């Protein structure tokens, strides 16, 4: 019986890894395909800008999707435990993966940040305009908060926290995600109002990210209004 149990656990673990690997592959493929099709293929952005400029857009979108998954599984498990409780163990992985990609996005953005790449963020004098300042402000605040939350994932730090403290820090992540929503809102709102100019009718990546974050916040609001099953694992 013990051997069968161990074998079953091993099989379940492998199945879980395959599921996670599949989700990662699909999200990354969709994010990059969307960015390439919208910007390089339809809009005509030069292919020489794919390695950093266009890929950075895809990385940012993937980061939002992975962080959204890390926050969505918990609330959804309260309503559909049979479906989502088995996925709760992946929350940390998706959260850290999303944070890692966000760090890559921030680094690449700093490399490219200039009027040549982001003219709508700058005045003719070469200084940041209001759009640029607000977008960068919200982005920096979001990254700072997510950095604090990421630190709590270190085993030594996590063990030092009570469930109540850990929950409080994780919930601060919703504030960070809201800051990301303001980041993309300030960045892309003007373009969202001009659908006639969307290449191929495809939504701007900033709008796709905004919708993904809004859905995550709505799911969280639904849990607050309709608590469902509160007997859920915390860590």
Image (cartoon, rainbow, N blue to C red):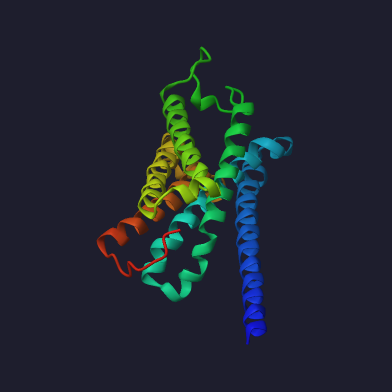
Specify whether residue 70 is in view.
yes
Instruction: Residue lying at the far bottom in this picture: please name it.
Output: 1
Q: Quadrant of residue 79?
A: bottom left
What x and y, as percent, mark residue 178? 39, 43
What x and y, as percent, mark residue 39? 62, 43
Q: Nearer the viewer, residue 230 or 102?
A: 230
Residue for point 53% across, 54% down: 92
Q: Quadrant of residue 1?
A: bottom right
Instruction: Residue lying at the far right in this picture: please name it.
Output: 48
Q: Nearer the viewer, residue 192 or 234?
A: 234
Specify whether residue 208 is in view.
no
Residue for point 61% across, 44% down: 59
Instruction: Residue lying at the far left in this picture: please name it.
Output: 225
What x and y, as percent, mark residue 28? 63, 53
Q: Nearer the viewer, residue 125 or 200?
A: 125
Instruction: Residue lying at the far top in this picture: please name it.
Output: 125
Q: Above or below — where is 129 with respect to 104? A: above
Quadrant in the picture for the C terminus: bottom left
């Amino acid at each position: 019986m013990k051997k069968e149990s161990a074998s079953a656990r091993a099989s379940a673990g492998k199945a879980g890894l395959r599921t996670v690997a599949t989700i990662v592959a699909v999200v990354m493929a969709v994010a990059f395909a969307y960015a390439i099709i919208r910007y390089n293929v339809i809009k005509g952005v030069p292919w020489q800008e794919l390695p950093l400029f266009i890929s950075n857009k895809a990385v940012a979108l993937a980061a939002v999707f992975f962080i959204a998954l890390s926050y969505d599984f918990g609330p959804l498990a309260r309503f559909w435990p049979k479906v989502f409780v088995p996925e709760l163990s992946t929350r940390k992985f998706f959260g850290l993966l999303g944070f890692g990609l966000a760090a890559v996005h921030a680094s690449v953005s700093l490399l490219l940040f200039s009027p040549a790449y982001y003219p709508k963020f700058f005045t003719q004098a070469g200084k940041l305009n209001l759009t640029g300042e607000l977008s960068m402000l919200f982005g920096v605040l979001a990254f700072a908060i997510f950095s604090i939350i990421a630190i709590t994932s270190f085993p030594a730090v996590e063990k030092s926290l009570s469930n109540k403290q850990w929950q409080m820090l994780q919930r601060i992540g919703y504030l960070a995600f809201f800051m990301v929503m303001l980041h993309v809102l300030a960045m892309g709102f003007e373009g969202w109002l001009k659908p006639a100019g969307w290449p191929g009718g495809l939504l701007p990546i900033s709008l796709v990210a905004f919708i993904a974050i809004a859905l995550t916040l709505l799911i969280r609001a639904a849990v607050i209004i309709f608590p469902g099953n509160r007997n859920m694992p915390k860590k």
